[in-house]
């Protein structure tokens, strides 16, 4: 297969967090296929091994590391094991449902720590090496909900992860802030924002409430998304490769929405 040099990741080393499943797994495997050496981390060893096995089919170096990116000791261990990286994908994240007026602040803190604190901390750890080498790509996985509020059809008052929305707005802030600091050194930082998405693992084991949310989401997709479907993890591999590639060298501080045209109406 012939790949244009501007899209090749050959010779680059990438770190993908939250690589155990879903979007993180798809990006890690896609980077391996594009020629990168891939360091991948997640908290669940079994899922991480599955991702590593898929990535190794493309013949490059694959380094799986079980780590919790909210814990400083794990961050330091990850940095030592990963070594210098050219591409950092801050993908690890989650949400907790609950009414905003009654959500436990301990839950709020936990989500903010994973979704917002950890990406910034990893930028602190890995960006200086990129600056020194004068080449680097940082991709923060955000969300279209980082620039809008919850869709009431999908998020009734009793189910609205307020900390998730706040954290994704914050991710855009980190991207905008760091872009001007890193650009003079040949390092770009951008956000990749999924729209309504249902990964293959999210479809497994849905309870009745989950099935109802999926039904509403698919109805919303048909009526409001220009592509008339929900996204899946494979829709994001190409954009993630592009943002990590030499071809994106003049793009920084931006948010790439991959949402089937939902936000373009």
Image (cartoon, rainbow, N blue to C red):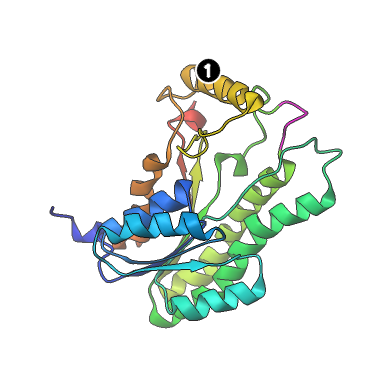
Is 89 on the left or on the right of 2, as rendered? right
Which element type, helix, strand or loop, lies under badge 1? helix
Q: Position of residue 227 (x, y in %)?
A: 40, 25
Identified at 82% across, 42% down, the residue is: 103
- Between 25 and 191, the one lying in front of the other is 25
Toward the viewer: 183 or 103? Answer: 103
Q: Main secondary structure of the magenta part?
A: loop
Q: Quadrant of residue 148?
A: top right
Please name whichever residue, 80 or 162, is drawn nearer the observer in this view of the structure. Answer: 80
In the rendered structure, the answer to whether residue 177 lies left or right of residue 38 reads right
Q: Which residue is mark 1?
A: 219
Could you tell whether 255 is left or right of 227 in the image?
right
The picture quadrant where one finds residue 40 is: bottom left
What residue sits 40% from the left and 55% below the top? 51
Whole-percent x and y of residue 99?
80, 35
Residue sitting at the far front: 46
Instruction: Say few, some or many: other residues with alpha carbon within 10 Å of mark 1 (under 14 / 14 to 19 / 20 or more).
Output: some
> Where does the magenta region start and end?
156-160
Q: Is residue 252 visible?
A: no
Name the residue located 49 percent from the left edge and 34 percent from the top edge: 198
- Asked whether residue 67 is drawn in magenta, I would say no
| Residue ID at (62%, 64%) | 118
Residue 242 horizontal/vertical position (percent): 33, 53
Q: Position of residue 223 (x, y in %)?
A: 50, 16
Residues 261 and 153: in front is: 153
36 is higher (above) or lower (below) than 235: below
Q: Do we see residue 10 in this rendering? A: yes
């Amino acid at each position: 297969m012939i790949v244009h040099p501007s899209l090749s990741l050959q010779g680059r080393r990438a770190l993908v967090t939250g690589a155990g499943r879903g979007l993180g797994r798809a990006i890690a495997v896609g980077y391996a296929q594009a020629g990168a050496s891939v360091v991948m981390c997640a908290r669940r060893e079994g899922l991480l091994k599955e991702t590593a096995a898929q990535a190794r089919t493309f013949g490059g170096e694959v380094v799986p590391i079980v780590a919790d990116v909210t814990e400083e000791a794990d961050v330091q261990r990850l940095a030592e094991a990963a070594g210098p990286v050219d591409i950092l994908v801050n993908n690890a994240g989650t949400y907790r449902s609950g009414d905003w007026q009654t959500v436990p602040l301990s839950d709020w803190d936990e989500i903010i720590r994973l979704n917002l604190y950890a990406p910034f901390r990893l930028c602190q750890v890995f960006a200086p090496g990129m600056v020194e080498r004068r080449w680097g790509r940082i991709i923060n996985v955000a969300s279209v909900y980082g620039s809008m509020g919850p869709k009431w059809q999908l998020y009734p008052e009793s189910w609205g992860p307020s900390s998730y929305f706040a954290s994704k707005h914050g991710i855009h802030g980190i991207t905008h802030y760091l872009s001007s600091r890193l650009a003079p050194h040949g390092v770009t930082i951008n956000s990749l924002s999924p729209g309504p998405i249902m990964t293959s693992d999210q479809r497994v084991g849905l309870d009745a409430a989950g099935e109802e949310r999926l039904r509403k989401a698919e109805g919303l997709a048909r009526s409001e998304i220009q592509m008339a479907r929900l996204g899946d993890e494979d829709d994001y591999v190409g954009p993630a490769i592009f943002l990590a590639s030499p071809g994106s060298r003049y793009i920084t501080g931006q948010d790439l929405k991959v949402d089937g045209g939902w936000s373009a109406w």
